[in-house]
Each structure stands twice: as C-alpha cells, then as structure tokens.
Amino acid sequence: MVRLGQGKPTAWRDLLATGPPERLVVRQGPAGQGGIQVAGLTHWDVPNLETLHQMLSLGRSNRATAATVMNQHSSRSHALITLTLRAASPPRAQGITGTLHLVDLAGSERVWKAGVASPVQRDPNGARRLREAQAINRSLLALGGVMAALRARRPHVPFRDSQLTRLLQPALGEGTT
C-alpha cells in the first residue's frame, strides 16, 4: 500500500488524488490505525514495482514547485511517502507488516540569498514566497529539535511543534527501530 502527501507546514494535500487538490489536516486517527495521520489521504494497493513507479511519478508531477534565485524548480513543501509492506503467503493471508516512511524535505532557505524577500513591487509573489520560506524553515527547525531531543534521550520530545514531526512521531518515537 502506498500513500503520498505533500505538506506545507500548515496544510497537506494528497499527491495521488484524482480530483482537484484539497487541503487536508493532520489529526489523531482512530484507535488502532497508527496514531497521527493526514485525514483524507488516499491509500492505494500496489501489486508490482511498475505500478509503484507510476504512482511515484504521478506524485512528483503533482508536487508544488516554484522558481527562486537559488533554484529554478524549488520544492515549496515537504513530501511524505508511506509504504506499508506485507509479506504473506498466500497473498491474502495474515502476514508480517512493516511501514517505511520516505521524506523529501523542502530545503532550508536564507530568504535574502534565495531572492524570496524581494519587495512586492518587483515580485507579486514575493510576500507569499517569503511566508513559504519562513514556514519551511520553522518546520525544519522543529524537526531538528526533535532529532536533538531523541539523540540526547530527553524525557520530552517536542513532536507537537510541527505537523511534519507529528506525522513522523510513530516512526521516530519510543519503541521504533
């Protein structure tokens, strides 16, 4: 099974959805269904690697990018791919299940160097790009705080500081390998 979502620090969208993009929210999932999740994110059964490759290509083509001074095709969001793998014989039997999260983080930007802080008179999208860059940087800072707390084995890990870290909590938190 595969899920592919794009996350701006305050909103997520389904990169595999067939209709127009909808704003999805991160919330606590139903008991027994993995804790924190993106409500409304579709999941697809993938029978083979060719289908997986097609789905990843679709997700990549649906991902938001924009030009900055530093990069012509800068991703303006994080992407989270969740693969749930099940080994069972016969195929519909109960078997061993594992989950793999792959995250493509939007890059940290120095807003002046990237040219996203230009005055609105020169760039009508400048204010929006500046807010995006600031939100991306806050999200990356929150992830760094979580990683530092885990590395130091602190009793409190600040998973709630961003939607990205809330989503990654099951993969990074206590009892994971």
Image (cartoon, grey):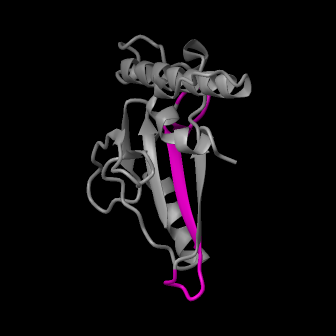
Q: As displayed, is residue 50 above or below residue 70? A: below
Which residue corresponds to the image point at 49% horizontal and 84% vertical from the top-left? 92
Tell me if residue 73 is in the magenta stretch: yes
Q: Position of residue 173 (x, y in %)?
A: 59, 38
Residue 63 visible in this rendered orientation of the protein: no
Which residue corresponds to the image point at 44% horizontal and 18% vertical from the top-left? 130
Report whether 48 appears left or right of 7: right
Residue 47 visible in this rendered orientation of the protein: yes
Report the number of discs: 0
Tell me if residue 123 is in the magenta stretch: no
Q: Position of residue 98 (x, y in %)?
A: 60, 62
Residue closer to the observer: 116 or 95: 95
Residue closer to the observer: 118 or 111: 111
The stretch of residues the image draws in magenta is 68-93
Which residue corresponds to the image point at 42% horizontal and 68% vertical from the top-left? 44
Q: Position of residue 30 (x, y in %)?
A: 33, 50
Q: As displayed, is residue 34 above or below residue 68? A: below
Which residue corresponds to the image point at 44% horizontal and 25% vertical from the top-left? 132
**In the displayed image of the protein, which residue is found farthest to the right?**
151
Q: Position of residue 166 (x, y in %)?
A: 47, 35
Q: As displayed, is residue 50 above or below residue 172? A: below
Q: Quadrant of residue 103?
A: top right
